[in-house]
Image (cartoon, rainbow, N blue to C red):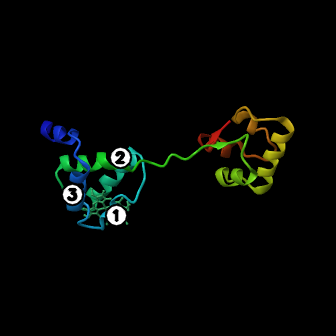
Amino acid sequence: MKLALFVAAAAASFGQVQALMEKHCARCHEAAKSYSLKQDRDGWQATMNKMVGLGMKAPDAELAEIFEYLVKNYPADTVAKLKVNECRAIELESTLGLKRSVAAAVIAYREKNGPFKSLADLKKVPGVDPAKLEEKKDRLSF
Ligand code: HEC
């Protein structure tokens, strides 16, 4: 086990990992499918577990190398936050799933009262659903 960890830690070169993926992953599907996702560490862990569940067999150390490679090179997309005080109505609709009339109300409120300082401010706009905003608050910046 110690040896396996050491091998995994000795960060294989790009070419070596490619070869490992050819050997282990491309057995069942074309190589491109193996990196068709962009996700965080937990996501890649789940994918690896899923492939093992589907019958993938390979030495742990080699799977660990592939796993670390995928985590590093295919991370989750970081989505830009919506600037609540600069955005247009259409962006409120698409990012927050607001109805057109509610998005328009947010813009009107902003024009009348000045910039929103926080989520609490935004929740004051007539017609917005506070629970929905709470759910999406990580997508917003003030
Ligand atoms: C034993 C066969 C097998 C092996 C080996 C295998 N896969 Fe897969 N893989 C599958 C199957 C089957 C699917 C399609 C699963 C589905 O449609 O639910 C899949 C789908 C995927 C997907 C698409 C997303 C998904 O969850 O459906 C990714 C990413 C992936 N594999 C990555 C890998 C990686 C990385 C390796 C090597 C470390 C690998 N696979 C090895 C069988 C395998």
Q: Quadrant of residue 109?
A: top right
User: For the residues carrying marks 3 and 2, which lies nearer the camera in this image?
Assistant: 3
User: Between disc 1 and disc 2, whose residue precedes?
Assistant: 1
Task: Identify the residue shown where x is 38% and y is 45%.
Answer: 42
- Disc tally is 3
Q: Is residue 56 visible?
A: no
User: Between disc 3 and disc 1, whose residue precedes?
Assistant: 3
In this picture, residue 15 sits left or right of residue 73? left
Whether the residue carrying mark 1 lies under 8 Å from ligand 1 is answered with no
The residue beneath circle 3 is 19
In this picture, residue 72 sits left or right of residue 96? left
The residue beneath circle 1 is 32
**Which amino acid type corresponds to the residue marked 3 in the rendered image?**
Ala
Q: Secondary structure at mark 1?
A: helix
Task: Identify the residue shown where x is 67% and y is 43%.
Answer: 133
**Which amino acid type corresponds to the residue marked 1 in the rendered image?**
Ala
Task: Identify the residue shown where x is 21% and y is 52%.
Answer: 16
Q: Quadrant of ligand 1?
A: bottom left
